[in-house]
Image: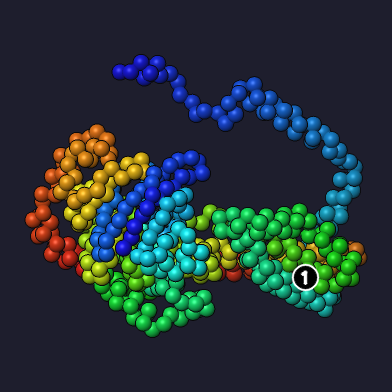
Amino acid sequence: MSTELDALLGQKWRKPPLVKRAWLRWALGIGFTAYLIAAFMTIDVNWSRVYEGLDRGAAFILAFTSPDFVSRASDIWDGILESIIMTVAASVVGIAISIPIGLGAARNIAPLPVYLVCRGIVAISRALQEIIVAILLVAIFGFGPLAGFLTLSFATIGFLSKLLAEDIESMDRVQAEAIKASGARWLQWINYGVQPQVMPRLVGLSMYRIDINFRESAILGLVGAGGIGATLNTAFDRYEYDTAAAILIIIILIVMALEYLSGIIRAKVQ
Amino acid sequence: MLRLKKLVKTYKTGDQALKAVDLEIPQGQVLALIGPSGAGKSTMIRCINRLVEPSSGEVWLEDTELTSLSSGGLRRKRREMGMIFQEYALVERLTVMENVLSGRLGYVGFWRSFTRRYPQESVDEAFRLLDRVGLLAMADKRADELSGGQRQRVGICRALIQNPKLLLVDEPTASLDPKTSRQIMRLICELCEERGLAAIINIHDVALAKMFVQRVVGLRFGAIEFDGRPEELTPDVLTTIYGEEDWEATIEKVDDEDDEQSDTSLGKAAEVAAL
């Protein structure tokens, strides 16, 4: 038996800790807890205001038991239609632009300059929140669905390109190498070596993005960028909680339908 | 046919994978490249078709020097070098037929390959090759539905449909059971003989290599330590390639030649049965 082994026998064994220095480990733990407590203390709650608000909250929730689809039917219908048009158009355009940018943003297939430009586009798109972009575009193009459509397209690029690029970066290199070894051109290489590997994820992400775009389109109306959000906002402003409830129920149903559809489609392309 | 002159590969990390390798392979010769893991076997065959860029030296395929080719010229020359991979490297979500036809990508335009409308002679050749390896019935199955041995046969078809002059074979049997390994090695060597192809086969299994090839090259730390006929692989030679070990068992296997002969017909029957 070696002396090295002798020294270890009978010793307790523990998994090595993530942070090796004990003092640093404890300092991090205590510091974080202290910050958390301090942070919660700065959020002050006005309990009397909460008590008053409970009534309004209850009225809002009770409205769901009697949603009013009828009295503003044409407004709701127009809003939903506009939202769907915005969603479909923005998703198609956004996805179409995302694919080349996603290819460019994958380090394992793009040369460095292309990679940096594409990552830059992704970073800008992700840094600017939808509402901020929408306010800017409404200022440029005026109220209406055009601003909403452009906003959602822009946001889709940041989301989809980034996740597509990450999927390409984690693909199996050897499968792509085998296609390259046959003397394929670059586009053929992408079509045979890369695309089959990332297709299920691309379809899944696209479906998810359509879902997100539809929900966002309900928010963008709040800043005048068209869609069902405008109708929803008006309903809230007039305290027509029953109409608002009707709109929310429709949104929930459409999102659930999209979720169901995406499940079917993803199973197909697996 | 293939000549390597002072081929050197130094990786960015400073590891010298190949140290001025000189090697010449005549038309139709099947060569086994043996050596311990990390000896540079994979690097060497990848330097030939430039999946790995060599640091210096020359690679001559017939009258063309490959290391100085532009990307277009390289693409055309890659068509003449079929490659068979460890772990098969089939595109798993494509069908068997698409995988085989992908070997023709260097010959067809993008639009034809994108729409999968290959010229009739390519399609016929793909069917002929699949029939030759006994997988005709699997043509429209997805590659990930096949067993290991079947996948490697598809890999062989993909390499052969390129109509290559040279086969680069990287550990073809590394993930196969002993029997399938023999069948695959036999198939590769038979096909090389039928078509008069030269081949470099990287292989871990020394005994298996000795059964099938005419020439063995031993690589150690990126340099050629042995180059000769399989019979010349003595325990001393294996020790210089791999280091100290008891080699008697590995050498002995060569003697079961007649066992191998009777095994051939059985193997063939099993190949058919495996379908």
Q: Quadrant of the N terminus of chain B?
A: bottom left
Does dot 1 land on a helix, a strand or a loop? helix
Image quadrant where residue A2 sits: top left
Q: Is residue B170 visible?
A: yes
Q: Chain of mark 1?
A: A
Residue nearest the viewer, comparing A268 with B143: B143
Rendered position, B257 above or below B111? above
Please give the name of the residue rendered at 41% of the width and 82% of the height, measured from the top-left corner: B119
- In the figure, is residue B192 to the left or right of A40? left
Q: Quadrant of residue A141?
A: bottom right
Where residue A224 sits: x, y (%)?
Answer: 87, 67
Residue drawn where x is 78% and y is 68% of the image: A150
In this rendering, the answer to whether A41 lies above or below B151 is: above
Which color scheme does this rendered protein use?
rainbow
Question: What is the x, y in percent for residue A241?
Answer: 84, 64
Residue B239, picture quadrant: top left
Q: Around disc 1, counting alpha carbons within 10 Å, would you say few (fewer than 14), some (14 to 19), or many (20 or more)?
A: many
